[in-house]
Amino acid sequence: DGLPGNETLIFAVDRSTILTGLDPNSLYTVVAQFQANPLYGFGLFSPPMAAFTTPSKPANLAVAGGGTNISTKVGVTWAWAGVQQGNVTITGYKLNYQSTDGLATGVTYCSGGATRDCSLDGFKNGKTYSITIAASNDPRLETNFGPISDPLSVDTPGSLPNVYSVATVRTTAYSAVVSWVADG
């Protein structure tokens, strides 16, 4: 975070190491120094490199409106309450869905970190789907996705009503009243 006293010193024998204890969705500056022989001390610092940790997983994934799904289009919501986040802007989300039989799958991207809802389309009737979400701080929404949320189970209806024909149309200068014949 650039504040004095927050440096971490790690000695590594290999040419890589794991930094632990970092905060989620935060920016860190990483530099390295090489020591070929303890008698000669350390060499120069490497150029600094920015390292972004991934966001935490969103919480409370739910069907929008708190109700049940009534079509093949599903709206979902989520929250960040109680989830630790750092100082980097969340740029968007990746939602994965898969039917329990594994035959129907899909991915939807929702941009905008302030977004707390997204609409998924293309679900098949009469299936149960598992939906998960992960947040990213990559402006392109290509990398740096955090851990996935707990899955949300959603049932789609067995079928939607079929419209057989328009029965009547009554019009005025500014409106039309339409009725139709449908099953279900």
Image: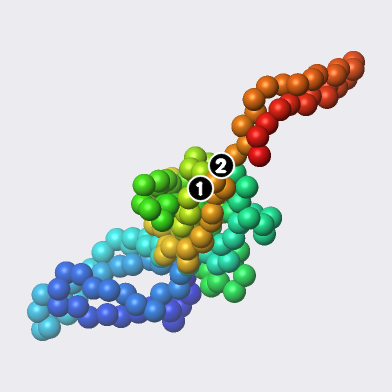
Crowding around mark 2 (Cα neighbors within 10 Å: few <14, some 14 to 19, many 20+) is: few
Q: Can residue 39 be seen in this view?
A: yes
Residue closest to the eye, 70 or 111: 70
Residue closest to the eye, 65 or 134: 65
Residue 113 at x, y = what percent?
56, 54
Crowding around mark 1 (Cα neighbors within 10 Å: few <14, some 14 to 19, many 20+) is: some
Is 29 left, or right, of 109 in this rendering? left
Q: Name the residue type under label 1.
A: Gly
Q: Which residue is drawn at 83% across and 24% down?
A: 177
The answer to whether the residue labelled 2 contacts the one labelled 1, judged by CB atoms less than 8 Å apart, is: yes
- The residue lying furthest to the right in this view is 173
Q: Is residue 109 visible?
A: no
Q: Relative to residue 106, is residue 12 depicted above or below? A: below
Q: What element carries label 1?
A: loop
Q: Name the residue type under label 2.
A: Ser
Q: Which residue is drawn at 41% across and 56% down?
A: 100
Which of the two labelled residues, at mark 2 and mark 1, occupies the earlier sequence position?
Answer: 1
Residue 10 at x, y = what percent?
27, 80
Residue closest to the eye, 179 or 108: 179
Q: What element carries label 2?
A: loop
- The residue lying furthest to the bottom in this view is 39
Q: Relative to residue 87, is residue 140 depicted above or below? A: above
The numbered mark at residue 159 is: 2
Residue 178 at x, y = what percent?
79, 24
Residue highlighted by disc 1: 126
Q: Residue at x 46, y 69 (%)?
A: 24
Residue closest to the eye, 130 or 12: 130
Residue 57 at x, y = what percent?
48, 66
